[in-house]
Image (cartoon, grey):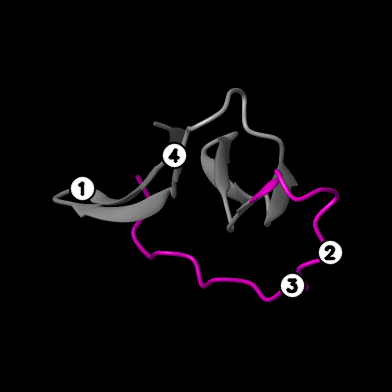
């Protein structure tokens, strides 16, 4: 948990490597008691007909927590 939600950083989206790649927006990873910005990236879906559910910040009584994105 963190007290102040991080600001979204600005970065440039590069061209997709192929038509099947999906853009994953900004992502955060917990490391050593802090969240580290991962940034956006193109990924090849693990199987056909899956959808990326984006990660998001959620406010809890103890502070903000990152809910990671996942395939559905």
- Number of residues whose C-alpha sits closer than 10 Å to that of mark 3, classed few (under 14), some (14–19) or many (20 or more): few
Q: Which residue is mark 3?
A: 11
Q: Which residue is mark 4?
A: 68
Distance between mark 4 and mark 1 Cα atoms: 18 Å
N-terminal-most mark, 2 or 4: 2
Q: Which quadrant: the C terminus?
A: top left
Left or right: residue 65 versus residue 45 is left
1 or 3: mark nearer the eye? 3
2 or 3: mark nearer the eye? 2
Left or right: residue 52 versus residue 61 is right
Distance between mark 1 and mark 3 Cα atoms: 30 Å
N-terminal-most mark, 2 or 1: 2
Query: Where does the image place residue 35, in percent across and percent down from the top left?
Result: 55, 47
Q: Which residue is mark 2?
A: 15
Q: Are marks 2 and 3 in contact (CB under 8 Å)?
A: no
Query: Where does the image place residue 1, in percent across and percent down from the top left?
Result: 35, 44
Query: Where does the image place residue 39, in percent across and percent down from the top left?
Result: 68, 56
N-terminal-most mark, 3 or 4: 3
Query: Where does the image place residue 69, in percent across and percent down from the top left?
Result: 45, 41
């Amino acid at each position: 948990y963190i007290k102040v939600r991080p600001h979204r950083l600005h970065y440039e989206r590069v061209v997709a490597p192929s038509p099947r790649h999906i853009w994953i927006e900004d992502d955060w990873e917990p490391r050593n008691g802090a969240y580290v910005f991962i940034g956006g990236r193109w990924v090849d879906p693990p199987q056909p007909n899956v959808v990326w559910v984006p990660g998001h910040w959620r406010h809890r009584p103890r502070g903000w927590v990152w809910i990671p994105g996942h395939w559905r």
